[in-house]
Amino acid sequence: MAKLRSVKGMNDVLPEDAVRWHRLEDTFRELVARYGFGEVRTPLVESTDLFVRSIGEATDIVEKEMYTWMDKSDKSLTLRPEGTASAARAWIQHSVGGQHPVSKWFYVGPMYRRERPAKGRYRQFFQAGCEIYGDPGPFVDAELIDLVVRYLSALGIQDIEVLVNSLGAGETRERYREALLEYLRPHASELSEDSQRRLERNPLRVLDSKAPQDQAIAENAPQILDYLDEESAQHFEDLKTALDAMGTPYVVEPRLVRGLDYYTRTLFEVRGRGGDLGANAALCGGGRYDNMIKELGGPDTPAIGFAIGLDRLLLVMADSEPKPSLDGFLVVRGKELRGQALAVAQKLRDAGCRVDADLRGGSMKSQFRRADKSSAPFALVLGDAEAEAGTLQVKELATGDQQELPIEQVADAIMRR
Ligand code: ATP
Ligand code: MG
């Protein structure tokens, strides 16, 4: 019989590694709470329509990467490839705009894209993201970019580059589209197959292509910043001034367009420069999407958001000192004491200690072996004498130092370390 394995590109996280995931998630939650973000939890499955309408038909995600199937009720469903569309759908569905002029939401969770798996590229991967509805920016845009930099810095990820650009608003896009098409058409036959196909429908995609022949042509393409309408140009100036005021590092990258169709004005990406992923790995993408809410049937509401790829952060994050996952390991001298050992363990847990015990009734030696392996700094020995006296022998495993303490004092003693 064939061995059962996880689906290609979808990974298990075992308890040893989960600790690093907790650090990523806890740091994120603590940070965004300081800005007043509240968590939104949407389903992993949505109508296919939602993603087609928001992300855009002529994009890699919608054309090739979505897990889509026909449900038994003949409705097309899709595993979410990203979080922004689902959050916007929920925001509209629950008429949140009617209750709050500005709302700040965050999410953390798995996303699904059927990509070719590679280091830092999986078919199930995790994103942490924020969305702000109802503020046209640009100051909130700067605050959000700065938040991402602070988050990475809190994880010890300093070697990064923050790229910013503006895609302008309505008329900019039309004028730039024309100029770009004019430039690209003569090169059409040299473009990749994907780009040739999308050229007329969505020429901006060519700039975001990873195909080397496309990148070579994109290099000399006209720049969208030269086409900004006056208001968008001012918006971009104010964004840069606000970033400067906070001391947030950034580089203007006029060719940054990114893979989703819904962006307007502010666009940004954070790349890692070192670590296992190599140079230029995209760690975070974000931008303003002032038209999307309306296009999805909601009220005309400006919005901005970002998504950080947590799997990639794990690959560039400095390892912190691993914390032991237990405070003490209970060692029981004699099988008959196992029931009492349970009661002692529960008492310690009630006092806030993390305690495990080997209750299989093995020898002292084998129990000590498990204690050593457990990462607990202390072995707590319970024998007849200790049970009688209401005490435990508290042995520091690294040094061998041992002292007998009343059970009530054990929790304090081992947690103080
Ligand atoms: P890339 O250019 O690397 O394909 P993207 O533009 O498709 O990235 P976004 O849709 O902007 O990425 O998602 C935001 C972040 O999510 C990325 O910067 C990246 O860190 C992460 N990410 C995207 N796709 C994957 C994936 N397949 N596996 C792991 N992380 C991913
Ligand atoms: Mg991608």
Image: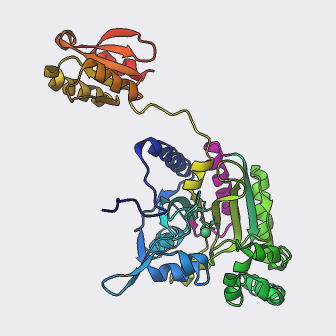
Number of on-image labels? 0
Instruction: Give the image quarter of residue 326.
Output: top left
In the image, the segment drawn in magenta is 132-157
Q: Is residue 306 above or below residue 383?
A: below
Expressed as whole percent of the image width and height from the top left, the position of residue 301 reads 58, 76
Ligand 1, by image quadrant, is bottom right
Left-right relation of 83 to 194: left
Residue extending furthest left? 336
Q: Give coordinates of residue 132: x percent, y percent.
A: 57, 65
Tell me which residue sits at (55%, 64%) in the image. Answer: 117
Res. 142 in view: no
Quadrant for the N terminus in the image: bottom left
Residue most toward the front? Answer: 1
User: How far from the left and from the top, in percent, is residue 268?
Assistant: 70, 64
Q: Nearer the viewer, residue 333 or 181?
A: 333
Left or right? Give the position of 384 relative to 87: left
Pick whichever, 320 or 409, lies toward us: 320
Which residue is rendered at x = 34% and y = 14% of the image?
A: 394
Q: Quadrant of residue 366?
A: top left
Taking the magenta stretch, the answer to whether it contains residue 125 is no
Protein image colouring: rainbow
Asked if residue 140 is among those painted magenta in the image, a careful observer would answer yes
Res 90 visible: yes
Task: Identify the residue at image location x=46%, y=81%.
Answer: 48
Q: Nearer the viewer, residue 153 or 114?
A: 114
Left or right placement of residue 356 versus residue 193 in this view: left
- Report x, y in % for residue 230: 81, 77
Quadrant into which the C terminus falls: top left
